[in-house]
Amino acid sequence: MKLLDFLDDPTLTELRLRMGARLVPKFTRLEIPELLSAIELSVLAEEGIALSDLDLVKVENDDTLSFKGYRVAIYIRDHGLVRDEQTLPAFHVAFCPTVAAMKDNKRLYRYAVTQQEDDHFVMNWIGDHTTQFSQRLTVCQRCLSILKWDGFDLIHMSKEEQFSILFSFALNAYYERYPKKL
Ligand SMILES: [Zn+2]
């Protein structure tokens, strides 16, 4: 069925003008920010929310990362290669070059965003069967460098100093400096 465009009708247009009626502006879609439900918030605070890409992860002015108004850490949750806990990638708390590449690699991995405060993260090994387990991860050194965490410097600092800051990093201290709610 073809819809009539009444604006093409000169009689109706004249009538409208005589009445002094203005045209209604075209409807535009309102951008309503997505909010997290209470359940999502509790998942975010514990095992984290799985994401297939990082489009919803925003970079704040202080270079930290946020998800729907909440600061988060991000990490790769699903691993399909040979299980090797020594080579697991770090988790991220800032917009470092690795995170920039992750944001470009759409749907290459399955990620998770989390506000948990301990350093054991929920992970999946994808083989014949998916096995879920908890694994300790360290924070990304490039993120520490971006945030200058405790003066962390990848270039002008000795390895000993770097490791000392790296291994003393704690997520609860991170959220004290960068509050969870934006
Ligand atoms: Zn990083």
Image (tube, rainbow, N blue to C red):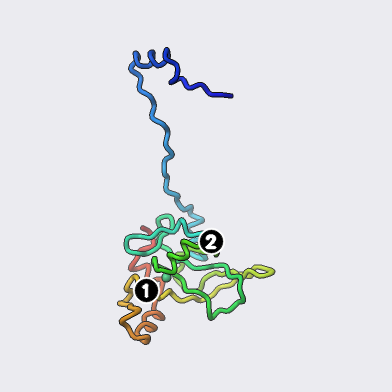
Image vertical order of residue 107 relative to residue 172, above or below: above
Q: Distance between the residues labelled 1 and 2?
A: 24 Å
Above or below for 170 versus 100: below
Q: Is residue 9 left or right of residue 3?
A: left
Q: Which residue lies furthest to the right in this view?
A: 128
Question: Compared to 52, does 154 lie above or below?
Answer: below
Tally of numbered tags: 2
Q: Residues within 10 Å of mark 2 (few under 14, many from 20)?
A: some
Going by the numbered disc 2, the residue's amino acid type is: Ala
**Mark 2 residue's CB less than 8 Å from ligand 1:** no
Secondary element type, mark 2: strand
Q: Is residue 21 left or right of residue 107?
A: left
Mark 1 Cα shell of 10 Å, populated few (<14), some (14-19), many (≥20): many
> Which residue occupies 42% across, 40% down?
30
Describe the element under mark 1 as helix, strand or loop.
Answer: helix
- Residue ID at (68%, 68%): 129
- Quadrant containing the C terminus is bottom left
Q: What residue type is labelled 1?
A: Leu
Q: From the image, which quarter does the N terminus lie in? A: top right
Answer with the quarter of the image where residue 154 lies.
Answer: bottom left
How far from the left and from the top, in percent, is residue 21? 35, 19
Q: In this view, does 161 lie to the left or right of 43?
A: left
Q: Residue at x 46, y 76 (%)?
A: 138
For ligand 1, give the image quadrant. Answer: bottom left
Q: Mark 2 points at which residue?
A: 50
Residue with the mark numbered 1: 144
Q: Which of marks 1 and 2 is nearer the N terminus?
A: 2
